[in-house]
């Protein structure tokens, strides 16, 4: 596993989270991109929802059908939140 994080002077940030199965990184705007070994790429426009998605079993199940790497994505968003100093802002959420 590899993780990188950097905040730039203009308050933008770069995040990279790589496992054997997926690569998750910032998309350059306000979300994340997840890419699997088969080069399937998916934009994650609201990563904050993954911090609480396990509290909603139906939503978790539905998301797991379209994203087989949901648990890895959940862990990556948790790591990002900690690295950002728990002041994680994305999509105007605090």
Image (cartoon, grey):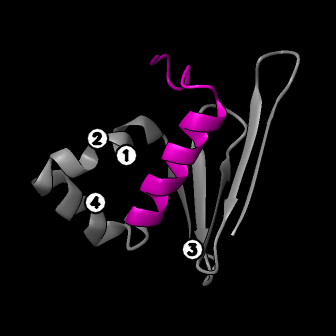
Q: CA distance from mark 1 to mark 4?
A: 10 Å
Q: Nearer the viewer, mark 3 or mark 4?
A: 4
Q: Quadrant of residue 70?
A: bottom left
- 89 drawn magenta: yes
In the picture, the disc for residue 50 is 1
Q: Nearer the viewer, mark 1 or mark 4?
A: 1
Over which residues does the magenta segment extend?
A: 71-94
| Residue 44 rendering spot, x and y as whole percentages | 49, 48
In the picture, the disc for residue 40 is 3
Q: Which residue is mark 2?
A: 52
Q: CA distance from mark 3 to mark 4?
A: 16 Å
Furthest residue toward bottom? 38
Residue at 57% x, 46% y: name it. Answer: 79
Q: Is residue 23 above or below residue 31?
A: below
| Residue 42 rendering spot, x and y as whole percentages | 53, 60
Secondary structure at numbered mark 2 = loop
Say whether disc 2 or disc 3 marks the residue closer to the N-terminus.
Answer: 3
Judge from the rendering whether residue 70 lies leftward or rightward of residue 44; answer left or right. left
Residue closer to the observer: 35 or 20: 20
Q: Which residue is mark 4?
A: 63
């Amino acid at each position: 596993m590899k993780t990188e994080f950097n905040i730039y002077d203009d308050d933008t940030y770069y995040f990279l989270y790589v496992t054997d199965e997926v690569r998750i990184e910032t998309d350059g705007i306000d979300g994340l991109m997840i890419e699997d070994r088969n080069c399937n790429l998916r934009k994650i426009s609201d990563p904050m929802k993954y911090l609480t998605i396990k509290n909603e079993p139906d939503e978790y199940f539905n998301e797991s059908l379209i994203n087989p790497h949901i648990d890895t994505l959940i862990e990556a968003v948790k790591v990002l939140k900690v690295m950002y100093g728990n002041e994680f802002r994305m999509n105007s959420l605090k």
